[in-house]
Amino acid sequence: MLRVAKIDGNDLVIRPVLKSFYCRYCKTIAECQNRRHRSGFWVVFEVILGSRKYLIIDGFGNSEKGSIIHDLVDDWETIYWGMSGARTFYSKKFRIYNHVTCGGWDDFYPLPRTVELDDDLKIKIEELKKKPEYLIQATDIPTIVKLLRANLVRKYRLFIDVDIKDVEFYPEFADLLPLFKAYKRSRTIVLPHNATITEFANCFTSVFKLKDIEFKIPKKLNYIKYEFSNRVEIRLTKTLSIIYSYDEKQNKAVVYYIKEYSPCCFNIVGYEQYKEILHRQLSMTVHRDYRFLNKLLDVFLDYRLGDILFVPIDSSYFEVLSEEFNYARAEQFNKITFENAKLENNILQPIDTNSTIKIFHPEHGILELSSKNEYVCLTFVSSHD
């Protein structure tokens, strides 16, 4: 039994009562956790808070021979049966899906789930305690505690109706207080160029917004901001960041949301709004290193107009990007007009080296370039109409 916090004078008590583990090769989760075996581990918690009682089902992984969830949930309804033999079931009481592959492997989602502990569930829990395979062993405790601490504030939804001033964590869980404060927090952070991050209470979801561009991001304890001459960078985590720019003169906003999967794999989601025109988002995965990503973002911010990149030929950008992207197609220039430049064989050449090159697209605005360079025209997604 774990006393987690005192809430409005009542102890929040959480007790793990049942567990289920499956692996073809290992007998315990402690033995399996550092191995790359296909396995599954699930826990059932009883929660007491004053007169209220809950049941929480949490866990991860897969099983091909049943689990505690199969025995605890008794209202499975078949909602899909594929030709391959794969099936999906749904429990209305627990709001849990169970997908069974054609090979017989179970997957439960979304977990964790918290429900009121009624008399029927109490009886069922007592019956399941008689099965030795579901009893909690000493080797299970480290994984159970790690699971509890990871999801207590984030996902168990025990603190929704609680005022932060009424909560006092016990010493063993006191380090969760900053996370709890972030969970309860509701505010709007104003960033350069009137961009905002709006945080919502009782969750870890925020929304980034610039003009009409908006998308969900994780709520963080702190947002690290860097402001440069041509961009603003918001560091969310080690693997998540937002880079954006806003041209007040043109009323044009460009935003890139970047997720790092590995040191050599990045996903970029791009957003653009020119005046009242909100473009469909760009999404691309880059299987290159961080050096390439930085060069790509420099080009996106300084040399992009729509789906065309005007890359200086004598720059290191061209050497790197020419291996990744194709030359722009003739139809992609149908709406584009040039001032102080001519286009020949996908090379943009200045006419007067003393004047700025201006490239105009009615749906993307104006791109100004130095007339000291020639530019190769590359493309990265489908052309415009």
Image: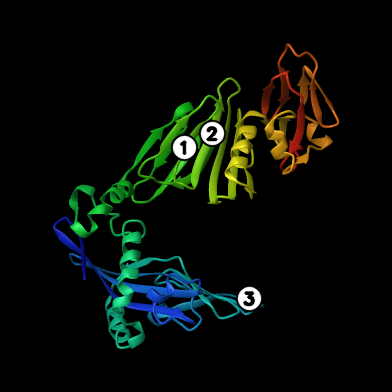
- Give the amino acid type for the residue marked by disc 1 in the picture: Ile
Q: Which mark is residue 82?
A: 3
Q: Residue at x 38, y 67 (%)?
A: 113
User: Residue 234's x, y, as percent?
Assistant: 46, 37
Q: Are marks 1 and 2 in contact (CB under 8 Å)?
A: yes
Image coords of residue 91 (percent x, y): 44, 73
State the scheme by which the image is colored. Answer: rainbow
- Please tell me how crowded label 2 is: few (under 14), some (14-19), or many (20+) other residues with Cα within 10 Å: many
Which residue is under mark 2? 244
Q: Vertically, is 228 above or below 213? A: above
Query: Which quarter of the rendering shows the N terminus?
Result: bottom left
Residue 22 pos. (x, y %): 44, 79
Badge 3, how many Cα within 10 Å: few under 14, some, many 20+? few
Residue 131: image quadrant is bottom left
**In the structure shown, which secondary structural element does the residue marked by tag 2 occupy?**
strand
Quadrant in the rendering for residue 58: bottom left
Residue 234: numbered disc: 1
Which mark's residue is nearer the viewer, 2 or 3? Answer: 2
Above or below: residue 346 compared with residue 126: above
**Direction from residue 79 to residue 187 in the image, left or right:** left
Q: Quadrant of the C terminus?
A: top right
Task: Tell me the amino acid under the disc marked 2.
Answer: Tyr
Q: Residue at x 34, y 42 (%)?
A: 186
Out of 337 and 141, give the one closest to the viewer.
141
Report if the CB atoms under discs 1 and 3 are less than 8 Å apart.
no
Left or right: residue 338 compared with residue 226: right
Tell me which numbered mark, 1 or 3, is placed earlier along the sequence.
Answer: 3
What percent of the width, then of the height, locates residue 300? 64, 34
Residue type, label 3: Gly
C-alpha span from label 2 to label 3:
44 Å
User: Tag 2 or tag 1, which sits nearer the N-term?
Assistant: 1
Q: Residue at the spot x=48%, y=27% of the render? A: 193
